[in-house]
């Protein structure tokens, strides 16, 4: 579904939300769990484009609900996988690969093999998508987490830095020792003139998104994240149900 000109949110995928940027060349932001490739390619064809027109696969961070289908999509289309150096291992003569965040075996949702990274990016780089796509390094959730910002449309893709729970925005799970780095990252996003926010988890905001983002950044919690989760287990169950179901 195209919800602002040139930006589509894909349907029938599992894991995080997947966004397609459409112009002369195509770009996808995150790929969800392993097994989403067919749905991604099917959507591209449904709008009258061809899989070979996909040039970029942007990975906001190395968790498998975001990068699970990247390797297969890369192999079938020839698109370049793009990730930040903080989530990438430089593998000598074999190039760069995404670091696995954890060792999990025998799961249909996790990648079978390491994902080759074709372009390693750093904070502030500007990529030629829809008038300019700015890379913003947002460590805290992972060392190499990034947000992506479309300059002309004032549209932000925050990855897991900001989650939309429906009634309000939320912080992700962050290790205690990473809390200060995360809050610094959140403040960076709150300083942007964001009109549209395309969340990885939760419904997009189509106007004045800067308002709730600033509200979230302005209220730093005093309790640990796990304590807040325990106080509201229903919300946690709803989050995981959405992440593992096709929508």
Image (cartoon, helix red, strand yellow):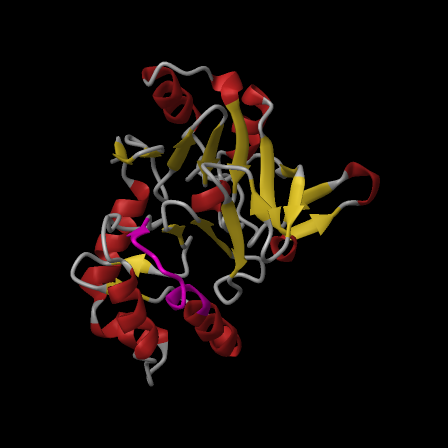
**Position of residue 6 measured from the top left corner of the image (x, y, whole percent):** 36, 32
**Position of residue 208 measured from the top left corner of the image (x, y, whole percent):** 24, 57
Vertical placement of residue 57 versus 23, above or below: below
At x 45%, y 36%, the residue is 130
Q: Relative to the observer, which residue lies in front, 2 or 226?
A: 2
Vertical placement of residue 74 versus 88, above or below: above
At x 30%, y 54%, the residue is 195
Q: Relative to the observer, which residue lies in front, 18 or 155?
A: 155
Q: Relative to the observer, which residue lies in front, 37 or 169?
A: 169
120 left or right, relative to 240: right
At x 41%, y 55%, the residue is 158
> What range is drawn magenta here?
188-197
Residue 189: in magenta span: yes
Residue 71 appears anywhere in the view: yes
107 left or right, relative to 126: left
At x 21%, y 54%, the residue is 238
Vertical placement of residue 39 versus 222, above or below: above
Q: Residue furthest right?
A: 93
Q: Quadrant of residue 128?
A: top right
Q: Which of the image's four quarters has the C terminus? A: top left
């Amino acid at each position: 579904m195209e919800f602002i000109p040139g930006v589509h949110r894909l349907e029938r995928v599992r894991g995080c939300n997947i966004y397609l940027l459409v112009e002369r060349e195509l770009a996808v932001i995150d790929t969800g769990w392993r097994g989403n490739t067919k749905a991604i390619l099917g959507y591209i064809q449904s709008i009258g484009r061809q899989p070979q027109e996909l040039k970029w696969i942007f990975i906001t961070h190395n968790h498998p609900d975001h990068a699970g289908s990247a390797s297969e999509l890369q192999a079938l289309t020839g698109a370049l996988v793009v990730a930040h150096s903080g989530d990438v291992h430089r593998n000598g003569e074999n190039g760069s690969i995404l670091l696995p965040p954890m060792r999990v075996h025998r799961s249909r949702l996790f990648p079978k093999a390491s994902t080759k990274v074709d372009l390693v990016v750093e904070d502030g780089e500007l990529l030629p998508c829809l008038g300019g796509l700015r890379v913003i390094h947002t460590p805290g959730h992972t060392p190499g987490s990034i947000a992506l910002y479309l300059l002309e449309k004032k549209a932000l893709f925050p990855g897991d830095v900001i989650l939309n729970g429906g009634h309000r925005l939320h912080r992700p799970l962050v290790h205690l020792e990473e809390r200060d780095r995360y809050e610094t990252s959140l403040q960076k996003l709150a300083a942007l003139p964001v009109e549209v926010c395309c969340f990885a988890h939760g419904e997009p905001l189509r106007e004045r998104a800067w308002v709730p983002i600033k509200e979230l950044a302005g209220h730093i919690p005093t309790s640990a994240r796990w304590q807040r989760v325990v106080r509201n287990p229903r919300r946690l169950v709803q989050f995981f149900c959405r992440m593992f179901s096709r929508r």
